[in-house]
Image (cartoon, rainbow, N blue to C red):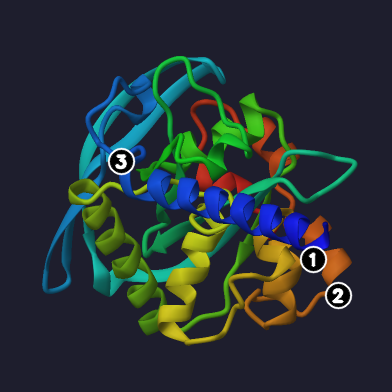
C-alpha cells in the first residue's frame, strides 16, 4: 500500500512538472503589440553620442485625477557632464503594513532639471495590477521615463500615497553608470519585451539589478526588503546608500514629501518645491 502511495505521489509530481514545463515552453509570449492604456502607449528609448543623450517618448501627463489625464510625449536632450545626483523614491501602498510599495529613481542634472525612470507593468486597456497575476505572465514590464510633475505628482497628489524621496550617496561616475544602464535596459525592452514577475522582475528588482552592475553582490535580490519594497529604504539605509546621517526613523520622516507636494501650485517649480526642506 505504501509503495502505491509513493508511486502515485511521484506520478502526480511528474505530471505537474511536465505541465509547468509545457506552459513555460509553449505558453504566453511577451509582446509590445497590444492595446495599451494611453499612459503606456509608447515605449521610451535613447540615443547616446559621447556625453549627449537624446531620450524619446518622455512622458509628461497632466492629471485631473489618477484616472483622468492628458498625455504628451516629448523628446529631450541631456548632457551627461551635467548629471549630478540620483534620488530614490519609495511609495508604500498601505499605512498599516509597509510591504507593498512602488520604487523608482530620479536623476538630477545641473540647473535643477530632473528625469524620473520607473519600472512598471505595462497595462492593457481594462487591466489592473494583481500580484498573483504578476506571477503568471499576465503583464509585460516597461520602463516609464518621465517628468517628475508626472511620475511623482501622480503618486503624491492624485493617488495620495505616502511618498519618500531620498538622495543617494554615489559619485557622479556611479550616477552616470546607473543612468546609462537604465536607458540601455529601456532600449532592450523596446526590441525584446519581457514579462513582469512579482518576485523576479519588478520595479525594485530592476533597480537592484542596476545597482549590482555597479557593485556586484551589493544588494541581495532575494532579500525580503526587495520582495516587499516598502522596506527597501531601510535596506538602502543599512547598506549606506542613502545620503543622510540621520537615524533611520528620523530620515524616513524627514524625506517624506507628499504633504509638501500637495501644497505646490501649478505655476511653481514642482521638483524644487518638494526638495525645499530636504
Quadrant position of residue 42:
top left
Residue at 77 percent of width and 55 percent of height: 5
- Disc 2 designates what residue? 247
Label 1 residue SS? helix
Front one among 258 and 29: 29
Q: CA distance from mark 2 to mark 1?
A: 6 Å
Mark 2, other Cα within 10 Å: few <14 / some 14–19 / many ≥20 = few
Give how far across and how far down residue 149 sits, in percent.
47, 36
For discs 2 and 3, the disc positioned in front in the rendered view = 3
- Picture residue at 35% right of the left edge, 62% below the top: 182
Q: Which quadrant would the N terminus be assigned to in this image?
A: bottom right
- Viewer-proximal residue among 239 and 273: 239
Which marked residue is nearer to the observer: mark 3 or mark 1? 3
Q: Is residue 201 left or right of residue 130?
A: left
Which residue: 48% across, 55% down? 201
CB-based contact (under 8 Å), mark 3 and mark 1:
no
Q: Which dot marks residue 29?
A: 3
Residue 68 visible? The answer is: yes
Q: How far apart, in angstroms, are the residues tagged by discs 3 and 1? A: 43 Å
**Which numbered dot is residue 251?**
1
Q: Secondary structure at mark 2?
A: loop
Give coordinates of residue 55: x percent, y percent: 21, 50
Few, some or many residues within 10 Å of mark 3 (<14, 14–19, 20+): few
Amino acid at each position: 500500500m505504501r509503495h502505491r502511495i509513493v508511486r502515485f505521489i511521484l506520478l502526480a509530481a511528474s505530471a505537474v512538472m511536465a505541465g509547468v514545463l509545457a506552459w513555460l515552453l509553449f505558453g504566453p509570449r511577451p509582446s509590445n503589440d497590444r492595446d495599451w492604456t494611453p499612459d503606456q502607449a509608447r515605449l521610451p528609448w535613447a540615443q547616446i553620442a559621447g556625453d549627449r543623450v537624446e531620450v524619446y517618448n518622455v512622458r509628461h501627463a497632466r492629471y485631473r485625477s489618477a484616472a483622468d489625464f492628458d498625455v504628451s510625449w516629448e523628446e529631450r536632450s541631456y548632457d551627461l557632464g551635467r548629471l549630478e545626483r540620483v534620488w530614490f523614491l519609495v511609495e508604500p501602498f498601505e499605512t498599516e503594513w509597509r510591504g507593498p510599495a512602488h520604487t523608482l529613481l530620479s536623476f538630477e542634472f545641473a540647473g535643477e532639471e530632473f528625469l524620473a525612470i520607473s519600472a512598471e507593468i505595462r497595462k492593457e486597456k481594462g487591466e489592473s495590477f494583481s500580484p498573483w497575476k504578476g506571477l503568471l505572465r499576465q503583464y509585460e514590464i516597461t520602463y516609464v521615463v518621465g517628468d517628475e510633475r508626472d511620475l511623482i505628482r501622480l503618486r503624491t497628489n492624485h493617488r495620495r500615497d505616502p511618498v519618500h524621496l531620498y538622495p543617494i550617496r554615489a559619485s557622479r561616475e556611479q550616477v552616470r553608470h546607473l543612468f546609462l544602464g537604465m536607458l540601455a535596459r529601456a532600449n532592450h525592452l523596446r526590441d525584446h519585451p519581457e514579462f513582469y514577475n512579482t518576485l523576479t522582475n519588478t520595479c525594485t528588482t530592476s533597480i537592484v539589478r542596476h545597482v549590482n552592475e555597479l557593485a556586484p553582490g551589493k544588494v541581495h535580490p532575494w532579500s525580503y526588503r526587495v520582495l516587499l519594497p516598502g522596506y527597501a529604504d531601510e535596506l538602502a539605509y543599512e547598506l549606506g546608500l542613502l545620503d543622510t546621517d540621520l537615524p533611520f526613523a528620523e530620515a524616513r520622516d524627514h524625506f517624506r514629501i507628499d504633504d509638501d507636494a500637495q501644497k505646490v501650485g501649478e505655476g511653481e517649480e514642482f521638483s524644487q518645491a518638494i526638495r525645499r526642506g530636504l
